[in-house]
């Protein structure tokens, strides 16, 4: 079966609409380059490819496949079909075909293996108590979301002073920004555990890609199984719940990309592309039926159990609307 090659671009952009947006892919570097120098509030998260591909987990029986299809049908009513995008939204600017469960399963995706199945989270920086709590809850949510081991490593700080090549001062915020590639190449790659599906750094520092890009929320390398994401801008105009939900969305969205999930275009889904934080806030903290099936197949995770686990997380942490939603999904799947 021919291996699909993915260069995923996942961007959480806070846009100023005064200027035309020009974003291109530098194919030789597998990076996103922003040619719009006038806009400050842009976020881009490029991924470098290519990873090795693991063997696909087969369905044990045809009944397993039939049950998964029934579960997909059962939760369809909980998701809004993707509407026609407005001019400032992701799909108005990036034409994407989406990815069905069938396409995913038939495309030799990157999967966890018995030898490499743990998601490692590396806090990197000096975090306040609120940010520490956000990371703690995100680790818990990711485990229940993917049914994979998630381990939080001891917090690290950047070794000062940094090389001038690896930081700069943002001319608008006057805050330090750290080069995302430096984190991937010099901090994470040398410390990648052998059993890691991925090593992911969370930092409270603002990040940049290169001189052409104002800032990025993160960068990931599928080939090297490392990623870094920034909390720096996710609490803009947000109470604790909104800050938490934004972080949960970023975390599971980008982890989904590291397992070959493409952007979702069929439903409003946490795997849908987003062009600004308003669009991010509109998306649910869960995946749609097509992407749920990818997780269930990838991790051999029974859908009803998954919804029950996520409902319990939301109940425990006072996400009341999401608790009700996950509980209803679990009930709907259980009826089949």
Image (spheres, grey):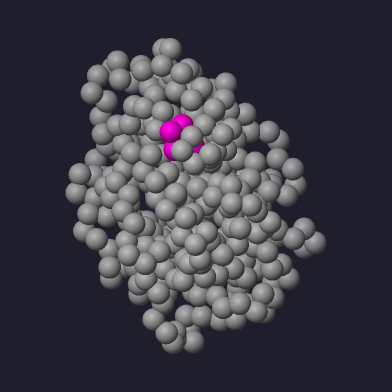
Q: Does 240 appear above or below 65?
A: below
Say above or below: 83 vs 276.
Answer: above
Residue furthest right in the image:
18
Q: Is residue 98 above or below residue 219?
A: above
Q: Is residue 115 visible?
A: yes
On the image, the x and y values in percent for residue 32 come to 54, 63
149 or 82: nearer the viewer: 149
Q: How many marks?
A: 0
Q: Position of residue 280 (x, y in %)?
A: 62, 47
Q: Residue at coordinates 52% horizontally, 59% vertically from top-left?
A: 130
- Identify which residue, 162 or 84, lies in the foreground: 162
Q: Quadrant of the C terminus?
A: top left
Residue at 32% over, 61% down: 153
Residue 168 percent coordinates (x, y):
56, 81
The outermost residue toward the top is 335
Task: Indicate left or right for 219 with 97 as reference.
Answer: left
Q: Quadrant of residue 305?
A: top left
Horizontal and vertical percent position of residue 171: 67, 79
Asked if residue 291 can be seen in this view, the reply is: no
- Residue that lies at the very extreme toward the left in this rendered image: 115
Residues shaded magenta? 310-314
Residue at 71 percent of width and 35 percent of height = 84
Residue at image position (56%, 34%) is 320
Q: Quadrant of residue 261?
A: top left
Secondary structure mostly taken by the magenta-highlighted segment of the chain: helix
Question: Could you tell me which quadrant the N terminus lies in?
Answer: top left
Does the magenta portion include 155? no
Q: Quadrant of residue 282?
A: top right
In the displayed structure, 203 sits above or below 103; it is: below
């Amino acid at each position: 079966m021919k291996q699909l090659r993915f260069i995923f671009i996942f961007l959480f952009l806070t846009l100023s609409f005064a200027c035309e947006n020009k974003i291109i892919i530098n194919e030789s570097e597998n990076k996103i380059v922003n040619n719009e120098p006038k806009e400050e509030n842009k976020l881009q998260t490029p991924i470098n490819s290519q990873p090795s591909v693991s063997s696909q987990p087969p369905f044990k029986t045809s009944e397993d496949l039939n049950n998964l299809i029934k579960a997909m049908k059962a939760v369809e009513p909980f998701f809004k079909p993707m509407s026609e995008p407005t001019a400032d939204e992701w799909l108005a600017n990036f034409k994407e075909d989406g990815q069905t469960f069938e396409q995913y399963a038939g495309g030799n995706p990157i999967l966890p293996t018995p030898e490499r199945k743990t998601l490692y989270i590396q806090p990197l920086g000096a975090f306040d108590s609120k940010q520490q709590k956000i990371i703690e809850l995100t680790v818990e949510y990711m485990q229940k979301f993917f049914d994979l081991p998630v381990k939080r490593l001891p917090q690290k700080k950047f070794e000062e002073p940094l090389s001038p090549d690896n930081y700069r001062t943002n001319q608008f915020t006057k805050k330090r920004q750290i080069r995302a590639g430096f984190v991937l190449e010099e901090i994470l790659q040398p410390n990648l555990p052998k059993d890691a599906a991925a090593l992911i750094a969370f930092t409270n520092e603002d990040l940049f890609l290169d001189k052409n890009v104002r800032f990025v929320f993160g960068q990931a390398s599928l080939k090297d199984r490392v990623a870094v994401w920034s909390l720096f801008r996710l609490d803009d105009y947000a109470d604790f719940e909104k800050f938490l939900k934004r972080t949960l969305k970023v975390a599971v969205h980008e982890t989904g990309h590291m397992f070959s999930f493409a952007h979702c275009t069929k439903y409003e889904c946490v795997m849908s592309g987003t062009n600004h934080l308003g669009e991010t806030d509109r998306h649910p903290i869960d995946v749609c039926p097509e992407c749920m099936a990818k997780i269930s197949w990838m991790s051999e995770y029974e859908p009803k159990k998954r919804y029950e686990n996520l409902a319990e997380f939301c109940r425990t942490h006072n996400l009341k609307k999401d608790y009700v939603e996950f509980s209803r999904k679990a009930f709907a799947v259980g009826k089949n």
